[in-house]
Amino acid sequence: MTSLRRRLFLLLISATAAIWICAVGWIYFANRAELEHVLDTRLQEAARMVHSMVASSNLETGHAAAAMAADFTYSRQLSCQVWSLSGRLLARSGGAPEGSLAEEAEGFSDRLINGEAWRVYTVVDPVHGVRVAVGDRIGLRTRLVRDLIVGLVGPALLTVPLLGLLIWVSLGRGLAPLRRIAGEIAARNGDDVSPVAGKDAPDEVRPLVEALNGLFAKVETARRHEKEMTAFAAHELRTPLAGLKTQAQVALAAKEEQVRDGALRQIIASVDRASRLVRQLLALARLEALPEVEHDGRELNLGSLVREVAASLSLRREIAVQVDGSLDGLTVRMDRDSLYLVIRNLHENAVEHVSPPGHVAWSALPHGAGVVIEDDGPGIPEDELAEVTRRFFRGRFRSGAGSGLGLAIADLAARRLGAQLAFSNRADAPGLRVEVRFPMVADAVEQTSSPLVE
Amino acid sequence: MRILVVEDDPVLADGLKVGLGLMGSTVDVVFTAADARAALSANRFDAVVLDRMLPDGAGLDILSALRRQGDMTPVLLLTALDETPDRIAGLDAGADDYLGKPFDLDELAARLRAIVRRREGRASPVLAVAGIVLDPATSMVTVGGKAVSLSRREFAVLSALMEWPGAIRSRTELEDRLYGWQEEVESNAVEVHIHNLRAKVGRAAIETVRGLGYRLRTEP
């Protein structure tokens, strides 16, 4: 059952009906016993009275029975017979049956006379030689009880639907805050994730509203990030295209050879940049496609790996790259491709931000806990340090050639290795310092010799 | 036209500088929002080409600040974000026009001419004063119906004089129109261009107002 209102209604109405039925049953049983007792007492009293009239006043027995019939208002219900001990009917009241009500023994008895059930009280008087029997039709008694029950159930049958209506309407009003909140949320368009107004919501609903608002806030943050990402990506992807197109049009329009050559050179530079962007996007896609790395167990020497990276990139600019001897003593077992991506992208980032003649220096962290790269570029503004690994994010100190993906790739690749990147500005001089902290696994890091620890 | 290009991508910025230059405009390029603010407060430009995403801030912030100061310089927003809500936000921030990347250089130039024309309150795309007709779109100039051939700088001086016929243009103003920041200006450059122009469009067409500058004669 999905409707809270219907569910509550059925619960309440069933509970009400059940209570009513119990009450009626209880009243019925309690009152029936009481009624039996009262009516039995009446029978007994009537029998004793008739007997005393017969015995004490020496009235004619026929007169006594007739007097009783005349005197008692409930005579229609009560029937009286006076018998001689020898078994002759001396007298009977108007409504009394032909058959004998009387029992041999004194006291109550139930009898069936002409198919009708009777409740009888018999008084036996051996002194006067009479037997007095006063009886009640049980049918009458039952009708009395039935009337009582009808009196109880009748109003109930009338009031329960009324009560049901009241309950239904009250539930509707009681559940109105829920409906209002639901309506408010239903009426929103997909973009609206502003908080739901839950101030006037009942205590039971408020946790739901708060949970909803919490969810809305998370969705909003995620969407803002997504939007920023899209904006950065659009900028980084479309701007080089705009540059290419513009330069191509310049080359077409230029009459002077010098201008045309300049434009063509710019086109080549731009295509190089675009190629690098494509390479980085592919690297990112590959990293994401294989989040779990199974390293082949080969040992990698950091010194030779860093030198390999530096050699592949140093042709581009006149930047001095220093690889500290401590790295040659550092050997790790890790996925080579991922570690290469970390080192290459950190190296590329450093080289791009250093203006010639600048320095980029690689060394090992103490105890072989990782590697560190320092450059003497402008560093990263403190407020941007947390953002640099976001895709397509390019800070205020951006280089001309970047696209905001290099550090994102380095970070993703490092995380695949279980390593951590720590970005900070150098304390001793302007420049960026990035630490690659290797995971603290016993077999991941092993120091064959430790030139640093001396 | 003297145009300020605010664009952080070096290749695109260079393309705009050279390309718009080929069409007769003088172009200055800045790469950051801070430099753009400095350039806009120090110089008068006929139009600004503004990238929306700059390394040190949003192009829209520069635009809003400019409009708050009451600066009417026509601004064309260049952006990688060209969805409708982005365009609306750009135009509502005070942009005169909006162009998504990548774009056509000729279209950019035409849009720049259009927003400059609107700002000057001209209906006709062609400038015509006292028998001289100048078409900024084709860089064609005719005098009395006959085509004359002008150098890029001569064309720029004539455009400046024809934009407000009868108004005096000082030598500094004309120098600003002709030369970007990086260009060396010879002290008598404007005089030389005026001299050559007079030879081509008629000696009487350009008046020298002593001590103030030059003016285009509105009566033939």
Image: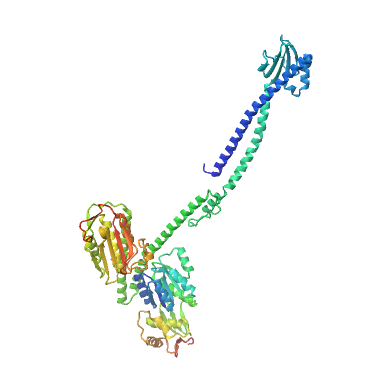
Residue B137 seen? no
Of residues A442 and A267, the one nearer the viewer is A442
To which quarter of the image does residue B25 belong?
A: bottom left
Q: Nearer the viewer, residue A70 or B64?
A: A70
Residue A157 vertical placement versus A102 (above, below): below
The tally of labels here is: 0
Name the residue nearer the viewer: A147 or B89.
A147
Give the farthest residue toward the top. A86
Q: Give the x, y percent position of residue A21.
A: 60, 33
Q: Is residue B55 above or below residue A142?
A: below
Question: For the C terminus of chain A, which image quadrant?
Answer: bottom left
Q: Quadrant of residue A411?
A: bottom left
Please provide percent x and percent y for residue A51: 74, 16
Q: Quadrant of residue B82?
A: bottom left
> What x and y, as percent, mark residue A337?
26, 57
Q: Position of residue A347 (x, y in %)?
A: 28, 64
Q: Extreme left residue here?
A: A449
What residue sits 37% from the left and 79% below the top? B181
Q: Tell me if B114 is positioned left or right of A144 in this view.
A: left
Q: Is residue A162 visible?
A: yes
Compared with A370, B184 (above or below) is below
